Image (cartoon, coloured by chain):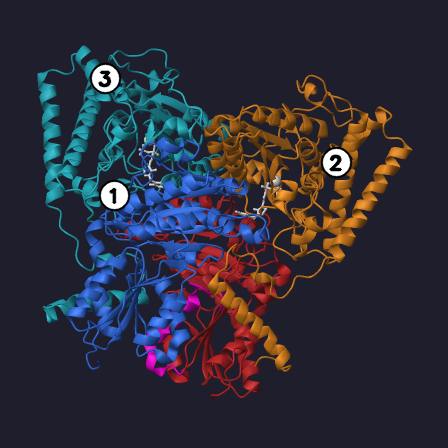
Chain colours: A orange, B cyan, C blue, D red
Amino acid sequence: MSLHAMGPVPQEDLIQLLAPDGSRTAGSGFDEWIEDVDGAALQGLYEDMVVVRRLDQEATALQRQGELALWPPLLGQEAAQIGSGRALRKDDFVFSSYRENGVAYCRGVGYADMLRVWRGNAPSGWDPYAVNMATPQVIIGAQTLHATGYAMATKFDGADSVAVSYFGDGATSQGDSNEAMVFAASFQAPVIFFCQNNQWAISEPVRLQAQRDIADRAPGFGIPSVRVDGNDVLACLAVTRQALDRARGGGGPTFIEAVTYRMGPHTTADDPSRYRDPNELEDWKGRDPIDRLGRLLEAEGLLGAEVSERVRAAADRAAGELREACVSMPEPGELEVFDNVYATPHAVLAGQRRDYQRYLASFEAAPGGAS
Amino acid sequence: MSLHAMGPVPQEDLIQLLAPDGSRTAGSGFDEWIEDVDGAALQGLYEDMVVVRRLDQEATALQRQGELALWPPLLGQEAAQIGSGRALRKDDFVFSSYRENGVAYCRGVGYADMLRVWRGNAPSGWDPYAVNMATPQVIIGAQTLHATGYAMATKFDGADSVAVSYFGDGATSQGDSNEAMVFAASFQAPVIFFCQNNQWAISEPVRLQAQRDIADRAPGFGIPSVRVDGNDVLACLAVTRQALDRARGGGGPTFIEAVTYRMGPHTTADDPSRYRDPNELEDWKGRDPIDRLGRLLEAEGLLGAEVSERVRAAADRAAGELREACVSMPEPGELEVFDNVYATPHAVLAGQRRDYQRYLASFEAAPGGAS
Amino acid sequence: MSTMTFGRAINSGLRRAMERDSKVVLIGEDIGMLGGVFRITDELQKDFGAHRVIDAPLAESAILGTAVGMAYRGYRPVCEIQFDGFIYPAFNQIVSQVAKLHYRTRGRVKMPLTIRVPFGGGIGAAEHHSESPEAYFLHTPGLRVVSVSNPQDAFLMIQQAIACDDPVLFFEPKRRYHTKGEVDEEAGLDGYPMEQARVEVSGDDATLVTYGPLVQVAREAAEAARGDGISLEVIDLRSLSPIDFGTVEASVRKTGRLVVAHEAARTGGLGAELAASITERCFYHLEHAPERITGFDIPYPPAKMEQHHLPNLDRILDGVDRVLDRRNSLGGGEGY
Amino acid sequence: MSTMTFGRAINSGLRRAMERDSKVVLIGEDIGMLGGVFRITDELQKDFGAHRVIDAPLAESAILGTAVGMAYRGYRPVCEIQFDGFIYPAFNQIVSQVAKLHYRTRGRVKMPLTIRVPFGGGIGAAEHHSESPEAYFLHTPGLRVVSVSNPQDAFLMIQQAIACDDPVLFFEPKRRYHTKGEVDEEAGLDGYPMEQARVEVSGDDATLVTYGPLVQVAREAAEAARGDGISLEVIDLRSLSPIDFGTVEASVRKTGRLVVAHEAARTGGLGAELAASITERCFYHLEHAPERITGFDIPYPPAKMEQHHLPNLDRILDGVDRVLDRRNSLGGGEGY
Ligand SMILES: Cc1ncc(C[n+]2csc(CCOP(=O)(O)OP(=O)(O)O)c2C)c(N)n1
Ligand SMILES: Cc1ncc(C[n+]2csc(CCOP(=O)(O)OP(=O)(O)O)c2C)c(N)n1
Ligand SMILES: [Mg+2]
Ligand SMILES: [Mg+2]
């Protein structure tokens, strides 16, 4: 007996500008949003995706080799992340979950900063204000509220920057994600809810979380939504640009469901063979985001040997730098655990730090150990 | 500057069977659901509403007289509560908030049981299993999940009873209420979400909580919804019966938004003059649920002097019994605070009880006090 | 100096903080036009506008979560939780976000939130309206917790909490909202730091420590004990995290006896921490094990039973008798 | 007797409980086809069906809230929280509903929920995956809290928890899931009540109390101390609410010294309660103030720093040295 109503994910009604075979799809109504995307820009998006995939694979390898404690691969989600990430302005602010390393790349996050937390060296990687992106959020759904509050404050300031929240299909079940829509709608906050529906929340298929398309939920809260082909980088760029434009113009929030697929495991600790049909993966490989743009470039003569080589070299370089940044990262100090718990002095914690310092020193005093 | 988008509540698209002037409204498509409601049944619904209003007024008076600590009046919401409450079967199970004393009346809750908690004599009033209704829930939204879980369990049992959750417009903002819709949809649980949109959550108008009609939210979760005239007892009866029928037949959850009005204060501790326009109340008085059915009865010759007298007498009797039940309620015992914290013996708490008992006894021993 | 109620003192403190810093915004349920169910934010929306005093939709997790987002953008949000028992929907945001973000971002992002919580019992209210949840928060690293016991402190400490770059849970003893007291509205914020406990009454025989609503009861207890020839030292903790152990320690070194009182449940409450820490710090000065006079380990009871749950004058004096080995409800009577 | 891992023992206990009572249902994230991220529910969905082992949508408040509804209808739900740090979204349902419903309904409605929480650190995990939130729950009247330290207890106590008519938080030390031990699968549930603490190692010089993941470390500490001529009595609390103070008290009356260890933050942790209660109960038997060896008052740190947060063998022995007035990191060395 199946307790819940499940079915396949319908692929109709997706906003698509680029078909899996690399041809341009007509009639989406979104062409105007990418009018400026010329050949060089297309090559740039291609390079971004190739580099990001390569970084992701290198990080996965680093985890297998014991250099990282964990890694959450984005394999398959490059178009959703690059398309949306490249639409943003520097002064927009991103609140993501843990899987958005492609977005982090677009924001200019350095490699060491990208890995710090996964190596276990620091509570998080980068300075959010240096790149206008919060560090990864692990508590599912929590960041949707942060983005909404940030957007409310942006409006208080009279600024026209936009907050963008990234989250997964599973996150839509959390109360927080729904409350975020309530607040965003009520305060007409300039926020974008960017849901990467990669079909899975660890072992749970999206049909356990949502009986209707995820994009169908937002309108009931008073938030316009679009359902976009998440493996189509042009469509992701276009819908995000439209949503940003609406938000900047005072039109309030937009919900974007990017329909994509997590081609790898949930994290390097996961074994998807326990719960999913390998045919599904094969099926989605036919819709690979990088191949797709590659076919367009080829058809338009934009992916000659020289370009290919340049892209490959960039990816190699990035991977090399990532690896180097990883293995050369300095180890944290013994007393770093006590840093930054508070912004202002805290007597009780200072006492604990002092005692622990004396404890560590006691080993030096008596080499035989404390006892 | 208004930070949020507000506007008046539109009154179109409401399911209505009885117009404010007492005439029957055609074309709702719901007539079949009240085909069996004959003259006697109409008189019964009328009596229910009059009695419930009278009980509510008596309780309000008891609070003013210091006999109750607090009372949450339902004035104006009689049709929503009686219409839905009378649709239920004995083996259905209600999970309500604090304002559903009309529903409690339908379930057969006794007067002392109705008041116990508001007098401050007990943590709650009645045995949920005696009337198949949970005692009032104060934590906004929490009970929507209880109803959903109960309905899931009903389905495990293969039974065809239905769980009904009552809550307000404000409650729709809580994460819990939204998660309840996720679970209800995913497990196709036989649950009804009955939202009494009484336009206010204490001082906050519904347009702060929801930018679209509340009923518009459920479909996005995969739950059919209806928006009903909550001051029309026949329409409330009809839509609830339809939803019950769907749930019993395995059709899963339904969301009902009953559009009504809280004519009184939020509770006896509230002063609505601080936040709402008195004209609004006047406006809604024209849509009074009892007057409305009264006009139909009069037009059909069903509210002669004898019937009027009978109804008045029933209301008087009920009010008298309520008052008597209130003032004659036994006071709780000194050690009752320790009862029922756990179902099984708990050594630490038993020790605290024993010490407190000795403490109380020490006053008898030494009349001058413990010190 | 002016005489004002406790509630009015907080209102006045909020107004000062908002005047001083345009980044201070208030958010909560019913705090705008209504001025909050206790009227603590009375008139503030009218005077500062709807974007400074924000009526939030009915969702506590979102109130805290959006406040976090505002703090990211440099704001200093003051969140009102309508009653103690309604803070739990926001627990996840408080414990995993508010408390941890400064640590998580290695100091880059500050979380100068103030979370105002009317707390405690004694008002004859319904379920969830009389709780004392402070222990959950003082066990949570990254948070600061304070509780105020008089209008002057209320006026100043709400401003100190808002000015603090760390998140502060600000517990207001709701049953004292109507208590009047003298308030010096010219007093500066630097005068008496909110981390510091205060000796309210000096004494030599035993130390009685409490905070919030019970400070007044403790003063009354000292008064009553004095009539009995017992000299109690009363300490108002004021800060519950960090606790100012130094002040308590100094007192216990003098008196040798400690009684701690709070309304919250006994097991795992602040009293346990205080008793354990003071025992560690001055074991050889203690003449008797510290005594805890607290609420019982029960859900907050209905209005007509709360007198049998709340620590009151007699129960506190009974505890004093115990640490002094005087006759008490559980025996004693040999010593002293 | 069979040898099995800790994780397998829980799995086996769950299976027994489900076989015994058809009202036992499991609900949680990824517990079905995947068998949970720790595989604790491995094969159970296959064997008992999707209505007995329910993969829930990703929402902890709903997992607890729907379990409450199921309990209303006579079920005994076992909720799995995937990791300790993900229990907070459900805190409101646990504290205001699960804990209070029996009281609220004056005993009419039972809440025989079991809430399984893999907890604690030492596995090199990311943020929110290594926390020890037990103190929040032992401060909450209406709940019972237990923690298991070995496969045999895990096998039996999960069944006892499920059979208990009160709600039970069941804390599983995730870093021990792969530890093997002997399990008597024929043992009956009545043999050793889950409320009872157990003396793991007998000794005379000091009492070392802990629970869950640190019981193994405490045993190692006793071993190491023995080499130093110190005889430690090790007690596994097993039940954290209620705490079996009697067993600890008996031990401390004998040894005169108490060390309590846990991974959770120090302030307001279980150690405070134990130290305070034992001081009350046997003040005149104590030779030294009780010592607490705990996690610091910090958010759980990143993997490469957790060694500087978690109590380990050396830190525990240092605490033992302190209560024995032997030389230790903070001084001492005169006594003993
Ligand atoms: C509150 C909370 N509950 C549970 C988890 C454990 N968890 C981590 S990722 C995940 C699945 C998330 O799925 P989805 O939102 O679709 O994002 P994806 O991983 O597919 O990108 C779960 C259950 C968590 N991190 N936070
Ligand atoms: C979690 C929680 N937050 C806040 C409150 C305080 N409160 C009690 S009733 C109420 C308004 C509820 O409005 P609505 O859901 O529309 O129901 P109504 O009172 O109108 O029937 C509020 C904010 C509460 N009881 N629970
Ligand atoms: Mg996903
Ligand atoms: Mg309402």
The prevailing secondary structure element of the residues shown in magenta is: helix
Give the secondary structure at mark 1: helix
Q: Nearer the viewer, residue C320 or C231?
A: C231
Q: Are marks 3 and 2 in contact (CB under 8 Å)?
A: no
* Residue C107 placement (x, y as % from top left): 58, 52
Cβ of mark 2 under 8 A from ligand 3: no
Which residue bears the numbered disc 3?
A: B292
Q: Earlier in the sequence, mark 1 or mark 3?
A: 1
Residue D264 in the magenta stretch? The answer is yes
Q: Which residues, given as a range, are shown in magenta?
A: D262-287
Q: Residues within 10 Å of mark 1 (few under 14, many from 20)?
A: few
Q: Percent position (x, y) of residue A349?
A: 50, 63
Q: Which mark is residue A285?
A: 2
The amino acid pointed to by label 2 is: Lys
Rendered-image quarter of ligand 3: top right
- For the point 62% across and 44% down, the residue is A128
Residue placed under numbered mark 1 in the picture: B130
SS for dot 3: helix
Q: Chain of mark 1?
A: B
Question: In this rendering, would A330 be left or right of B35?
Answer: right
